[in-house]
Amino acid sequence: MSTINYSASIMCGDLANLETTIQEIERVGIDALHIDILDGKFSPSMPLGLETVRRVRQVTDLPMDAHIMTMNNEYFVNEMLDIGAESVTFHVETTLHIDRLVNLAKKAGAKVGVALNPATSLSVLEFILPEVDSVCLMLINPGYATDKGEKQVPYALEKVRRLRALIDDFGLNVGLQVDGRVSLEVIPDLVRVGATNLVLGSTSLFIPGRTLEENKRLLDEAVAAGTVS
């Protein structure tokens, strides 16, 4: 079974006390910070500005997993590489020259991934899959995480299952990240069908009313339930 990596979505943490939130994330043993970069056009929110992200880089050594959800991906990829993100992921839906951005990231020494909206077909990965380090499957529409009525798409598990089969058929070591309502309830099934990287938000690591330590313990239990043969 593949190692399951945890990526904490800091937009779901306490943004008024961001440094404290990051210190707590470090303390409980999360693998990376998931940094959502939005322009208000590709999706309807803008939780973190680039200057805030620069300051985050100054206060932590945790790897930065930048998820770029914008209309001008090349600009934001370059900005995140300049800030020092260890990994950049951009959406295929708004990228005309995918290979160019993949090569930009690789030349900078960063890992690179592509992200797909819920209804985007896996067929777009046919030629690019061997060139990337990871694929991020959005399980809700990007930018609507704060909308409590936004539910995970009903075909989420089947799409993860099909991508896992595609990666395995190619014989690749490509990470399979899932993002959007990755809750304690669905994590066992997501892990079971092949997810290897979990973006953690308000339904897992940042569940209100519990400490991060308590949520992390429940998270580990959910992952373990999905790895049982």
Image: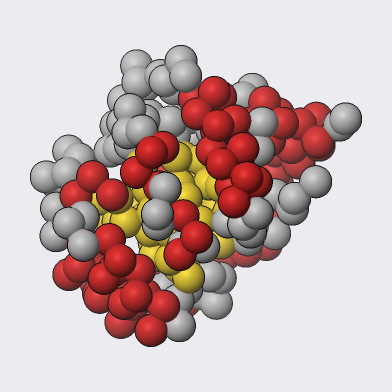
Quarter of the figure with residue 107: bottom left
Whether residue 205 can be seen here: no
In this picture, is 117 found above or below 1? above
What residue is shown at x 27% (from left), y 61% (from top)?
Answer: 98
| Residue 44 placement: quadrant | top left
Q: Is residue 189 above or below residue 68?
A: above
Res 75 visible:
yes
Q: Is residue 176 left or right of residue 59?
A: right
Q: Where in the figure is residue 185, as x and y percent of width and height?
A: 64, 22
Q: Position of residue 223 (x, y in %)?
A: 74, 37
* Residue at image point 31% right, 72% down: 80
Left or right: 168, with 90 as reference point? right
Tell me the residue at 32%/56% (across/down): 90
Q: State whether residue 213 is above or below residue 100.
A: above
Is 145 left, or right, of 179 in this rendering?
left
Here the colouring is: secondary structure
Q: Position of residue 29 (x, y in %)?
A: 70, 59
Dividing the picture into quarters, in which one does residue 54 lie? Answer: bottom left
- In which quadrant will I find the C terminus? top right
x and y, in percent, of residue 73 in the image: 20, 61
Q: Nearer the viewer, residue 221 or 134?
A: 134
- Number of marks in picture: 0
* Residue nearest the observer in this picture, 23 or 137: 137
Query: At x 17% / y 44%, what residue is drawn?
Result: 42
Residue at the extreme right of the image, as rendered:
229
